[in-house]
Image (spheres, helix red, strand yellow):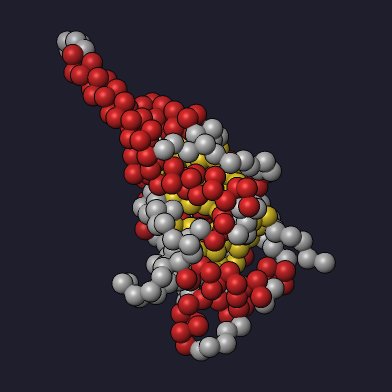
Amino acid sequence: MARKPKQIAIYGKGGIGKSTTTSNISAALAESGLKVMQFGCDPKADSTNTLRGGEYIPSVLDLLAEKRRVNAHDAVFKGFAGIYCVEAGGPAPGVGCAGRGIITAVELLKQQRVFEDLDLDVVIYDVLGDVVCGGFAVPVREGIAEHVFTVSSADFMAIYAANNLFRGIEKFSNSGGALLGGIIANSINTDFQREIIEDFAHRTSTPIVQYVPRSLTVTQAELSGKTTIEAAPDSEQADVYRALARTIAGHEVSKAPTPLSQTELREWSARWAEHIVRLERSERARPRAVA
């Protein structure tokens, strides 16, 4: 009998580094010997391209547009270290529901028992987190993913998207939905950025599972169409991703968060804005050393 894979969903607003983080987690897990599938749930179908040397793959919706009956295995492509890559895809811009690709792709792979056939250890869903849509909520609402993580920086819109995700998890937590594993704090390079994300995590009863600094190593790797794990395996940044992958692979206990209301979130962000202004004024007023 095939093993039941550990199923994880990683959410985050567009442009926050969610797919970069997810792909490096997948690469690190595969590097350690696990059988991994990365399931891209963005209509742009670009989640897995750095696992395949910059090459894009046809999505499930692309294949269904060509013919009505599709062998689900035809939507599965191998990438770095044997990672199985799937892209749900979406409709043309401005046409149809962007979440439909996720619903259709998940149903197709489940009906044809692809997860069982491949005998996977881990399935990671890479999900756009700043769109309020039933399709994007599928991994949480249906309990497909056991644990949900969110990638967030200290920027307000990233935190806003994370808080919205927390509200969705809280809503579905009593009906069998997935629970929250924690925050992956991305692009954290200063003390005040760390303080902001830590304060948000504290106020929403959410653990921070890893701090990931902004690094040119990541940019260089992506420009060459690769993950950091593949392009710069001996770098400090690669070791950060390996530590994150170990944490996620070993994670067992998730829980419902306590999201902030819209009013609470706005008041919280306003207090931080005032604090940063005070810090800047204090820095400007500080006497400079004479050379």
Q: Where 221 sits versus 279, above or below?
A: below
Q: Where 227 sits versus 62, above or below?
A: above
Residue 247, how many percent across, how many down? 62, 41
Point out the image quarter for the C terminus: top left
Determine the residue positioned at 44% across, 36% down. Answer: 260
| Left or right: where 131 falls relative to 275 | right
Nearer the observer, 239 or 256: 256
Determine the residue positioned at 44% across, 32% down. Answer: 200
Determine the residue positioned at 65% across, 71% down. Answer: 110
Residue 178 visible to an observer of this rendering: no
Residue projecting furthest to the right: 1
Residue 133, how many percent across, how many down? 44, 61
Point out the image quarter for the N terminus: bottom right
Residue 182 visible to an observer of this rendering: yes
Nearer the observer, 125 or 187: 125
| Left or right: where 133 falls relative to 120 | left
| Left or right: where 187 falls relative to 243 | left
Determine the residue positioned at 46% across, 80% down. Answer: 62
Q: Where 90 sits versus 149, above or below?
A: below
Residue 124, how many percent across, how many down? 58, 57
Q: Quadrant of residue 252?
A: top right
Residue 197, how many percent across, how many down? 43, 33
